[in-house]
Amino acid sequence: MGAREAGLPDVVPGASLPSAVTIWEVGARDGLQNESAVVPVAVKLEFLDRLAASGLSVLEATSFVHPKWVPQLADAAEVLAGLKPAPGVIYPVLVPNERGLDRAVEAGVTHIAIFASATETFASRNLNRTLDSQFEMFEPTVARALEAGMSVRGYVSMCFGDPWEGPVAQSQVVAVGERLLGMGCSQVSLGDTIGVATPGQVESVLAGFRDVSSLAVHFHDTYGQALSNTLAALRCGVTTVDSSAGGLGGCPYAESATGNLATEDLVWMLDGLGIETGVDLDKLVETSVWMAEQIGRPSPSRVVRALSK
Ligand code: HMG
Ligand code: MG
């Protein structure tokens, strides 16, 4: 059930809101990478199948990062080998470097995402590189992926604040993001990795980019601002929003990061605004309740809690 079926009045979207939003579902990757328990491959596969059945069309499936850095996703090849892709659904994976790309190619991947940092400290902690040298890793990776006909997304982490460095300058975020776009990334997702952003800051960072239509947003909900930030981004022209079913997630290399914006919370807001997502909210809630049982922790999503009582 959505806000509309609940009998709430229809809200006519303002001219600046899009009529449809693409949800980039990151639960199986960003969500599970931060669970202390390693989720069995069979559970990951059922999770992906259920997410597809709920109408989500982009399912970030796993990461080809170093298995010692993220043991929770060390089974990436097995997950992809067992995956039965649903029609019309894409399954991007995270790839940091050429070694990761080799593994992704072997697994038959068509969509990858590289992930850069906007700050020096996080580049070191998350990638073992400096702010500059992360690009030496990405450039040949992206060039080869594009040559192979893959689609490449870029992430920028720590766009709105960094746990070690504090506030992050807009110019720093824009420089990293534009560099990824210049490299051939078809879309750049701006990450509030630790969930500290507020809407005015979102507008200010987005305003620094030449073309907002090539941007997506990736909010974590640490301070309860993820939905307000999303609405601000939509009003600026963004039409792709990252979220995680049930609000799973965080980031193992940023301790203050809590879960991503929950997909259910996002869908409730978008449904209420009359913005198309293609998602069946009831099916998605059932999936997150099931996943919460698998990992032994209740979903932090308000909408999951409200609809599963
Ligand atoms: P490194 O130690 O500098 O790697 O790590 P290296 O290039 O020096 O290679 C060392 C060894 O690792 C070599 O093996 C490589 O082959 C191997 P050896 O020759 O010694 O036997 N190796 C690999 N093996 C398997 N797969 C690979 C791979 N790469 C190298 N891909 C590296 C550098 C980037 C690999 C490491 O730092 C890493 O894996 N980091 C990933 C951390 C991560 O996944 N973090 C979470 C994702 S980011 C995030 O969540 C934020 C986001 O959601 C957005 C937001 O919230 O803002 C995207
Ligand atoms: Mg994230």
Image (cartoon, helix red, strand yellow):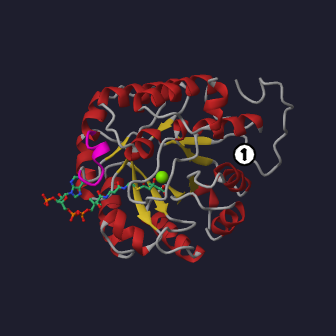
Q: Regarding mark 1 in the picture, which secondary structure is present there?
A: loop
Residue 138 in view here = no
Q: Which residues are magenta?
A: 68-75
Residue 85: where, in percent of width, then height? 39, 28
Residue type at mark 1? Pro
Q: Which residue is identified by label 1?
A: 18
Residue 209: where, in percent of width, then height? 61, 68
Looking at the rendered image, the quarter that the C terminus falls into is top right
Residue 11 lies left or right of residue 187; in this view the side is right
122 within the magenta span: no
Name the foreground residue: 281 vs 304: 304
Q: Quadrant of ligand 1?
A: bottom left
Question: Against 164, is 308 above or below?
Answer: above
Residue 247: where, in percent of width, then height? 54, 41
Instruction: Give the total number of marks visible in the rendering.
Output: 1
Residue 94 lies left or right of residue 4; in this view the side is left
| Residue lying at 73% horizontally and 41% vertically, measured from the top left | 19
Looking at the rendered image, the quarter that the N terminus falls into is top right
Name the foreground residue: 235 vs 293: 293
| Residue lying at 68% horizontally and 61% vertically, measured from the top left | 198
Residue 14: where, in percent of width, then height? 83, 47
Q: Tell me where residue 217 sits by quadrant.
A: bottom right
Residue 25 in view here = yes
Q: Tell me where residue 275 sits by quadrant.
A: top right
Name the foreground residue: 153 vs 243: 243
Residue 233 lies left or right of residue 147; in this view the side is right
| Mark 1 neighbour density, 10 Å: few (under 14) some (14–19) many (20 or more) | some
| Residue lying at 43% horizontally and 25% vertically, measured from the top left | 49
